Amino acid sequence: MTTQTWQQQKTALVTGGSRGIGAAVAERLARDGFHVLVNYAGNHDAARAVVRRIEAAGGRALSFQADVADPTAFPRMFDAAAEAFGGVAPGPTATALFFDGKSPELVERMAKLNPLERLGTPEDIAASVAFLAGPEGGWINGQVLRANGGMV
């Protein structure tokens, strides 16, 4: 079974998909052939930009505003994905939020603590998610994957 065959008609719901790690995950899964529902809390323009990039690359995506802290949010997102794409599968670093309020010196010290001596990127996390969501990750269940560059 090829990756392309396995992922036909697969849809991913990416929470926080408008920026940072979420946007990188959404775009990576789209490149891997998934239809993507890009969830966002408040930045409609950023979510639409992710959708446009996915569509420009030949993928299918939909943006959907919902606060994931609201217990009614997930059923509404799943319903929207089901209507647009027929369902959802699979389920649900160095970002602006990480850098907020940290001095450059602190960021550099934190990066040096990592065995790779760098901060992870949203694309690093997206690659891990794509692996777990893809056929090669099918045997990995009930585990905690620490995508952290080797920090213990």
Image (cartoon, rainbow, N blue to C red):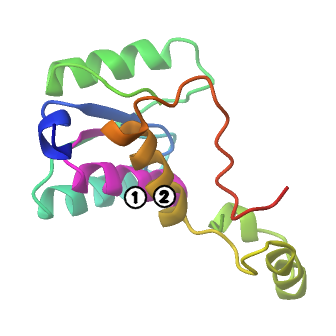
Q: Is residue 34 magenta?
A: yes
In terms of image quadrants, where is residue 106?
bottom right
Labelled disc at residue 142:
none
Residue 83: image location, x then y, percent: 17, 19
Q: Return the residue at label 1.
A: 46
Q: Nearer the viewer, residue 18 or 54?
A: 54
Q: Rate crowding at label 2 as few (under 14), some (14 to 19) or many (20 or more) other CA atoms within 10 Å.
A: many
Q: Check the picture and name the quadrant holding the N terminus.
A: top left
Please report the bounds of the magenta region as a residue range: 18-38
Image location (x, y in percent) of residue 18: 43, 52
Q: Nearer the viewer, residue 134 or 19?
A: 134
> Which quarter of the picture shows residue 119?
bottom right
Q: Identify which residue is drawn at 50% across, 12% down.
A: 72
Q: Nearer the viewer, mark 2 or mark 1?
A: 2
**Rendering coords of residue 50 (x, y %):** 32, 57
Question: Dot 2: what SS?
Answer: loop
Q: Amino acid at mark 2?
A: Arg
Residue 24 painted magenta: yes
Q: Which residue corresponds to the image point at 20% horizontal and 37% vertical from the top-left?
A: 7
Residue drawn at (89%, 81%), measured in percent from left and top?
A: 109
Q: Is residue 97 left or right of residue 61?
A: right
- The picture places residue 84, in percent across and down from the top left corner, at 16, 27
- Which residue shows up at 54% across the image and 25% down it? 141
Tell me whether circle 2 and circle 1 mark residues in contact (CB < 8 Å): yes
Q: Nearer the viewer, residue 101 or 148?
A: 148
Instruction: Please name the amino acid that badge 1 sits on.
Output: Ala
Tell me the residue that label 2 is attached to: 19
